[in-house]
Amino acid sequence: MKKNLLAAALVLGILCSAPVRAHGDASAVSAVSALPVASVVVGGSAAASAVVALPVAFSTAGAVLVVKTVESTARGTVLLLERASDGAQASIELGARAAGGVSLAAGTVVTVSVIGAGVLLSAAGEVIAFIPNALGRALLHNERLTR
Amino acid sequence: MKTKLSIAALLLAGLLAWGAPAHAGRSCDAAPALKTATVERGLQLAESTRQALDASGAQVVVLARAGQDLGKYGLRYSHLGFAWRQPDTSQPGGTVWRVLHKLNQCGTREAAIYRQGLGEFFLDDLWRFEAAWVVPTPAVQAALLPLLLEAGTEDRPGRALRLHHKPYSIASYAWSTTYQQSNQWAIETLALGLEPSIDAAAGEGVAARRQRAQAWLQFKGYQPTALNIGPLARLGGRLTAANVAFDDHPNEKRFADRIETVTVDSVFAWLQRSGLGGAPQRLALP
């Protein structure tokens, strides 16, 4: 019986490290479906950032912002952010799906990364919002053609 | 016999306790948190690839990513699709690159065709931030471009969707029509682009069309990669993942641990060998 147990344990061990696994499937639906693309809110409505200059609060890489308010709207979530260094404020709107995976509350510290494709806002090393510029928008498109 | 039964019982108990039923797959609802560094690097790779593709002068390329470490099989890349340049509707005079490829649905046994941007293509959880592509000859590009521009939808499928087969297995047999993995859809669709008669007969099922595409690929000298996957690994994959099956492989090959499937590396080598495309180009982030 001891031998059997050993054999079974061995088999299970091999199974658990089996190379043919679903996880890490290189052809899986891309994680980008979870990328929370956000728009800058201007004058109370979300605007495509193509026609809006990026708020000064988001323009410096490494800037530290704080979430002042989190407001649920019919379309998603609006965040009011304030730059810690000078109090500059700006609002962004996240779609309902984008905001779903992120836990946000007033007081959350957000850092700004400026990359070629736009601005990434992160909390604790995880992306909470991506505000694409024209370059970024040209890189993004997601359309499922078959059911 | 008693020994075998004991092992089977323990194995079953262990699997139940482990809690990974084969039909479950991975949930699409539980979107993983995106690490800032992963998104930054993925978008950087997408942008660098865009610049390189623009500079290449190509209209269509066969584009690959390294989403998984397949080094133990001697493979560098894991997944490919077709990328093409088209007018940017939001910026008059500009152009964008789009990718047509087949993606598995959250670890289930089904897959669908997607049209995505380079950003999405490289925002998968990559193993290596590296892109590779083959530029087909001008004649091959000219044959593929209309098919990519007019992919259509499921209700009104264009030629790019005519060989799509929903049942998916990650290492499907290259010469069977039971399942279809992503790279297999791509190479069969490439065959259809170059040999329109594959799609000629009306009223046929997808299997008949795929058989003709596979016959064309064999005639043109395509050779799939033979992966050495032993019985325990096969069993493990089959039991624990919905998107793994080996019952489409011929017994004599399967029981010799020889799993022949379509890989990026074998497609790239064949495109070059057959004169359909150039040498693979590679771009890696520093």
Image (cartoon, helix red, strand yellow):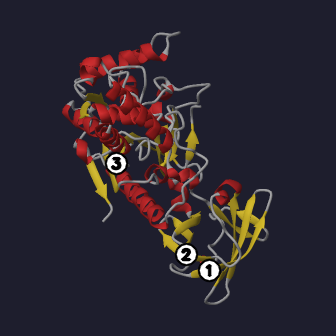
Going by the picture, which residue comes out furthest to the left?
B273
Say if A15 sits above or below B1 in the image: below
Residue B57 has which mark?
3
Residue assigned mark 2:
A112
As helix, strand or loop, the secondary structure at mark 2 comes to strand
**B142 sits to left or right of B74:** right
Callout 1: residue from which chain?
Answer: A
Callout 3: residue from which chain?
Answer: B
Question: What is the count of numbered marks?
Answer: 3
Give the CA distance from mark 3 to mark 1: 42 Å
Say if B147 sits above or below A89 in the image: above
What is the crowding at mark 1: few (fewer than 14 residues within 10 Å), some, or many (at least 20)? many
| Residue B16 image offset from top left, x and y in percent | 50, 38
Whether tag 1 and tag 2 are in contact, CB under 8 A, the answer is: yes
Question: In the image shown, does A47 or B122 lie closer to the viewer?
Answer: B122
Amino acid type, mark 3: Gly
Amino acid type, mark 1: Leu
Going by the picture, which residue comes out furthest to the bottom?
A86
| Residue A4 image offset from top left, x and y in percent | 31, 36
Look at the image and tell me in which quarter the C terminus of chain B lies: bottom left
**A39 sits to left or right of A71:** left
Going by the picture, which residue comes out furthest to the front?
A1
Residue assigned mark 1:
A65
Give the CA distance from mark 3 to mark 2: 35 Å
Q: Residue B49 occupies which quadrant of the picture?
A: bottom left
As helix, strand or loop, the secondary structure at mark 1 comes to strand
As helix, strand or loop, the secondary structure at mark 3 comes to loop
**Mark 3 or mark 1, which is nearer to you?**
1
What is the crowding at mark 2: few (fewer than 14 residues within 10 Å), some, or many (at least 20)? many
What is the crowding at mark 3: few (fewer than 14 residues within 10 Å), some, or many (at least 20)? few
